[in-house]
């Protein structure tokens, strides 16, 4: 008997998930908790994050808490690190998941909307990686998973979302930069690039259906959006020793959308 499944275990690990109050972040937090990790939900929406943390603790039987965090603010990220260390003593896993999207043609997009999307999606990943990665460097070990998007690889259509696409492409290359800089110091950094997934971000669009959703599904070989819990097992893999030689990688979870 080998020990393959044991290498997926996150027992005793401490994991921070940004934007973990709902959607993909919550689904990945649950999966990490299922694998044994203690969970810190770092979301701007503290009341919802507290509810979600309580649900994780009850369902998975691991310590889980919510620490209000704005990923765009360095002081908030540093305060999160201090609070996490005070409670758990170390940080093993960071999932940079918080993100927003604005649909708007490029010629009509305000600088304010452009800046907001870049600030949360790209600057937020840098701010959080610097704060938490700094602690991981002091520990000599750590694991960062950045949630990019297939929009880093292709241009979605028919909707305009140039700021989102550019931000996610930035996340992809920031991932590789951090992976290269920190590989010899015990930190791995990888990206998950999801396709269209059913979450609060996209629920309304899927409910309304219409031409946009029809176009998306026609362009997908699998002809359906992903469910949030279809990301969880990959997050466990990347967070665990099972993926010990995976570094600086981009892994798409998109039902084959970017394959043709
Ligand atoms: N849903 C999809 O189809 C899809 C596809 C590809 C990639 N993604 C990416 O996955 C991630 C999660 O998406 P989702 O669909 O679950 O979104 P969502 O809107 O359901 O959840 C996003 C969470 O991020 C939090 N958040 C927003 N701004 C924040 C900030 N400044 N600081 C901390 N938290 C903040 C929100 O409060 C919310 O809980 C995003 O990065 C998104 O771009 C989503």
Image: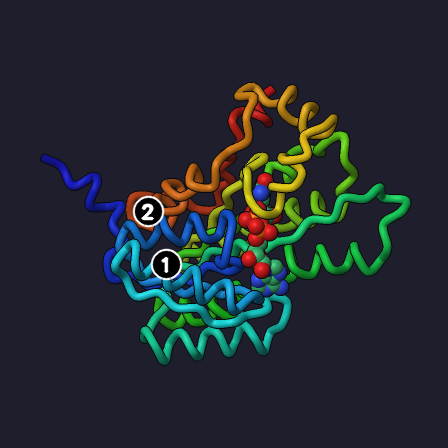
**Which image quarter is the N terminus in?**
top left
> Does label 1 or label 2 sit earlier along the sequence?
1
Near-viewer residue (53 or 40): 53
Q: Residue furthest right?
A: 107
Q: Is residue 258 left or right of residue 37?
A: right
Q: Is residue 231 left or right of residue 197?
A: left
Q: Position of residue 42 (x, y in %)?
A: 49, 65
Near-viewer residue (3 or 203): 203
Which of the 4 image quarters holds residue 29?
bottom left
Looking at the picture, does residue 71 appear above or below residue 219? below
Which of the 4 image quarters holds residue 242?
top left
Looking at the picture, does residue 14 appear above or below residue 27? below
Q: Position of residue 161 (x, y in %)?
A: 75, 42
Which residue lies under the disc numbered 2? 244
Q: Position of residue 224 (x, y in %)?
A: 55, 26
Labelled pair 1, 2 in contact (Cβ < 8 Å)? no
* Residue 101 can be seen, yes or no: yes
Looking at the picture, does residue 85 appear above or below residue 165? below
Question: Rounded to the nearest whole Å, what is the CA distance between mark 1 and mark 2?
Answer: 30 Å
- Residue at 68% over, 24% down: 214
- Residue at 47% over, 48% down: 190
Q: Position of residue 116 (x, y in %)?
A: 73, 60
Which of the 4 image quarters holds residue 58?
bottom left
Q: Residues within 10 Å of mark 2 (few under 14, many from 20)?
A: few
Mark 2 residue element: loop
Q: Residue furthest left?
A: 1
Q: Is mark 2 within 8 Å of ligand 1?
A: no
Near-viewer residue (158 or 260): 158
Which residue lies under the disc numbered 1? 55
């Amino acid at each position: 008997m080998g020990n393959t499944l044991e290498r997926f275990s996150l027992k005793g690990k401490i994991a921070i998930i940004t934007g973990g109050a709902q959607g993909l972040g919550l689904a990945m937090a649950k999966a990490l908790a299922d694998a044994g990790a203690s969970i810190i939900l770092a979301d701007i929406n503290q009341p919802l994050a507290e509810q979600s943390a309580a649900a994780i603790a009850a369902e998975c039987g691991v310590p889980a808490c919510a620490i209000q965090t704005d990923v765009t603010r360095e002081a908030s990220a540093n305060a999160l690190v201090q609070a996490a260390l005070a409670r758990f003593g170390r940080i093993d896993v960071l999932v940079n998941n918080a993100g927003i999207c604005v649909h708007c043609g490029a010629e009509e997009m305000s600088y304010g909307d452009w800046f907001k999307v870049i600030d949360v999606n790209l600057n937020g990943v840098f701010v959080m990686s610097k704060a938490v990665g700094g602690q991981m460097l002091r520990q000599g070990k750590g694991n960062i998973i950045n949630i990019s998007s297939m929009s880093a690889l292709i241009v979605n259509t028919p909707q305009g979302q140039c700021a989102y696409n550019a931000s996610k492409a930035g996340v992809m290359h920031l991932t590789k930069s951090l992976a290269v800089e920190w590989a010899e110091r015990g930190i791995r950094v990888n990206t998950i690039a999801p396709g269209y997934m059913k979450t609060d971000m996209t629920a309304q669009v899927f409910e309304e259906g219409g031409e946009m959703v029809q176009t998306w599904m026609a362009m997908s070989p699998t002809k359906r959006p992903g469910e949030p819990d279809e990301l969880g097992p990959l997050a466990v893999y990347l967070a665990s020793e099972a993926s010990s030689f995976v570094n600086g990688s981009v892994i798409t979870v998109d039902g084959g959308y970017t394959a043709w």
